Image: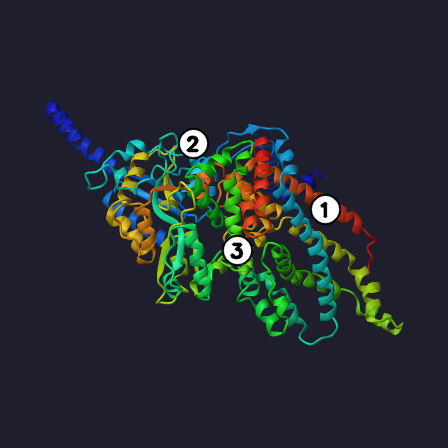
Amino acid sequence: MKKFRLLTLVLIVAMLVPVSTGLTSAQEKVKLVYWSMWNETEPQARVIQSWIADFEAANPNIDIEATWNGRQNQTLVRTALSAGQQIDLVDQDADPLAGGLVQEGMAYPLNEFLEEKALDEDVPIREVFTPGTLELFAVDGQIYLWPYIYNTSQFWYNKNAFAEADAEPPKTWEDFLSVCQKLLDAGYAPIAAESDIQFYQIDYLTYQIVRYKGVGFLRQTIEDKTGEMWRDPVYLQAAQNMRELWDRGCIPPETKGYLWPAGQQTLGVGVSAMELVGSWLPIELAPIVEGSFEWGAFNFPEMPGGVGKQGDLMVYLLSFMIVKNTEHPREAFEFLRFIMTKENMQKMADEALVGVTRLGVQWAEAIQDGATAAANATAVFGMADGSVAQYSEFVNNILYVNWSKLFLDELTPEEFVEKMATDAAEYWKGK
Amino acid sequence: MRARKRLIITFLFPATFLYLVFFLYPAIRAFYYSFFDWSGFSYEAKFIGLDNYRELIRDDLFIESLKNTLTIVFVGGVIVFGLAFALTILLNSGIKGRKLFRAIIFLPNVVAVIALTTMWSVAIYHPRFGILKNGLAYLGFESLSRTLWTSPENIFESMLAAIIWMNVGFYVVLLMAGIDKIPHELYEAARIDGANELQMFYRITVPLLWDVITVGIVLWSISALKIFEFPFAFSALEPSPNTYTIAVYLYVMGFGQRTPIYRLGYATAMGVALVLTVVVVVVVLRRVLRREVIQY
C-alpha cells in the first residue's frame, strides 16, 4: 500500500512538473522597452502604436513598453542609459543617431540578423530595404541602424507655377538658372528659403560639391586637418553660384528675414515656386495649400564639368537602433522584422504620408517624385555628405555658421573660402 | 538650550539635506566634469585639465554668446527699468483703469514663452505678413516698413525688443508694489512745499524704493544671464547662432540639437563660466547699488 501511495505521488508530481513549467514559461513575458523620437499623437507614433499592438497579439510572450519622448529622444536615452535604465530599442534621425549612440559604441550589430529571412518571405531581410539605406551609416562594414522612414532632399516645386512659367524640371545648372528666369518673368519668387535653418541652407553647398567632385569630397575636405582643401577652386565656385542665385533675384531679398516656416509658407500660398528641402515639405504645407496645388520634385541639377550624377541623392533617414546592452536582442529584432512587412510599411506610408525604406511600397501621391528619385538613386549620402554623423561639431560650429553667413550675404565668396580654411586649421589644431 | 539646538537642527535638516543632495552635490560634480572630455553617454571621461576653459576663450561662438548675454543684461536692463519706471509713474498718476492697465502690462508673464516667441517672430516681424511691416506701411513709413526685422543683422535687436516687452510687466508690478508702501503724506508735504512730479520722483520715490530697485536689478541680472527659452524658441526649428546666449550654446554643445555634438564636459565648463559670470555681476551690482536704507 505504501509503495502504491509513493508511486501515485511520484506520478502526480511527474504529471504536474511539465504543467507547472509550462505555466511558468507562459508567465515569463519578455518586456521590450522602446524610447521613441515621436510625440504620442503624431501620425507616425499612431502607426508605431498599431504595429506594437499587432506584434504583441502575434507574440503573446513579448510586451513592448513605449515611451514617447519627442525629438530630444537621444539626449534622454543618453541620460537614462548612463543611469543604468533598461532601454532595448530607440529611434531617431539616422545622422544624429550615427553620430551619437552608434559612435559611442552603444548600438547592437545587426549584420547577422539581416541575413535572416524577411517575415513570410523567402528573401533575406536585408534585401527588402531600398539599396544603399542600410549601408549608409555602416561602420567598418557593420550595420547598426535599421532605417524605416525615407526622406529625400530635392527641389520640391509647384507644378502649376512651373506650367504657368513654361518651365520644365532642369537637368543642368544652366537649365536651372533659365527656369529661375522664367519663373521670375511669370511673377514668381522662384526659390523659397529660410534664413535661420542652417541644415537646409547647407544642402546648396553639399549638392554642388557632390555634383562637381562626387560623393565624399566634402567629407574629405572636412577631414583635412590643414584646412587647405577649402582653397580648392570648387568651393569658391560653389559660393559664387550661391550668391548668383540671390543676385539674379532667384531668391528674393526678403528671404533674409524669413524665420521658419515663413519661407516655405510662401511656396504654400503660391508666392514662390520651389524649395530645396526634405520630402516632408508637402505634408507640412498640406494645411495651407489649395486643393488644386500639385507637388513635384526634381533632383539638384548637374554642375558644368562635374563628375557627380543628377541621380546622386541626399537622404534623411529615420532609424531604429537596438541598444547594445539589451538582454533581448532577438525579440527586438523580431519586432523590427515585423515592421518591415509590406503591409506594415504601407500602413506607415499611407497614414503618416511619409516615404519608407521598404521596396515595393507605394508612397503618398504628393511625394511620388521622391519615391521615383529614391528608386532611381545612383548613390545616396547623408547630411553634409555624411559629415554630420562623424564631425558634428565641425559641421555645426564652423561649416553651418560660415555657409549661412555666405548664404545671407554676410561673407563674400572669397571671405567664405578664407574663413573655412583658417577656421578648419584652427579647429583641428585644438583637437 | 540643548533642546532648542536640537529643534533648530530638526527643522533645518530636511531643507539642508535636499539642498546638499540635489543642488550642492550635482554642482560640485558639474565643476569636476568641466575638467574632462566627456560625452555623457557613460561614465568614461578623459581628464584634460583646463583645456575646456582654454577652448572657451578661443571659441568664437562662445564669445558671441557671452556678448549677446551681456547685452541682454545691461542694454536690456537699462531699457526694462527705464520703461518700468515710466509706466509706474504713468499708472500712479491717477489715470483711470490703473488695475486693468497693470494687468495688461503683466499679461506676457503668464503666457507660455513659445506662444510669445511665435507671436513676435511670425505675427509681428514676418517680412511679408507681419503687423509691423503692414502697420508701418499703413502709417506711411514705406522705407521703414521694408526693414527685415529678423534678418541676421537685425534679429538679435528684434529679439531683445521682444524680451524687454515680455519682462517690463513684472518690474512694473514690483515697483508699483513698492510705491504703494510709500506714505502719501510725504508726497502731500512735498506738494505743499512746491515740488513738481519729477522732483517728487527723484527725491521721494527713488530713495524710498531703493531696496526694491536693488532686488529688481539683481533679479533681472540673474534671469537675463541665464536666459534660455526665449532665444531658443525665437527661431522655431533650431536656434540661430545670431541669437545664441550662453545657456543656449551650452545646450547645443551638451545636449545635441540636430547635430549630435554631445560635449557634456565642455558644456559643463560653459555652465561653470556662466555661474562665475552671475556671481561677478551680482557682487558688482550689490556693491554699486549699496546705499543707506531709509526707514519709513
Residue A162 is left or right of residue A415, and the answer is: left
- In this view of the protein, which residue sits in the foreground, A373 or A4? A373
Residue located beneath label 2 in the image: A105
Contact (Cβ within 8 Å) of mark 1 with mark 3: no
The secondary element bearing badge 2 is classed as loop
Q: Are marks 1 and 3 on the same chain?
A: no
Instruction: Measure how far apart labels 2 and 1 are at the Cα level.
Output: 42 Å
- In this view of the protein, which residue sits in the foreground, A29 or A101? A101
Asked if residue A202 is positioned above or below residue B118 in the image, the reply reads above
Residue A100 seen: no
The residue type indicated by label 2 comes to Gly
Residue located beneath label 3 in the image: A246
Q: Quadrant of residue A140?
A: top left
- Give me the disc on residue B222: none
Residue A79 is left or right of residue B200, and the answer is: left
Asked if residue A125 is positioned above or below residue A182 in the image, the reply reads above
On what subunit does the disc labeled 2 rest? A
Residue A186 seen: yes
- Residue A226 is situated, as x and y percent measured from the top left of the image, at 56, 31
The residue carrying pointer 1 sits among few (fewer than 14), some (14 to 19) or many (20 or more) residues within 10 Å by Cα, namely some
> Mark 2, mark 3: which one is toward the viewer?
3
The residue most toward the right is B193
Residue A42 is left or right of residue B49, and the answer is: left
Q: Quadrant of residue A63?
A: top left
Residue located beneath label 1 in the image: B281
- Residue at the location (89% across, 72% down)? B193
> Mark 1, mark 3: which one is toward the viewer?
3
The secondary element bearing badge 1 is classed as helix
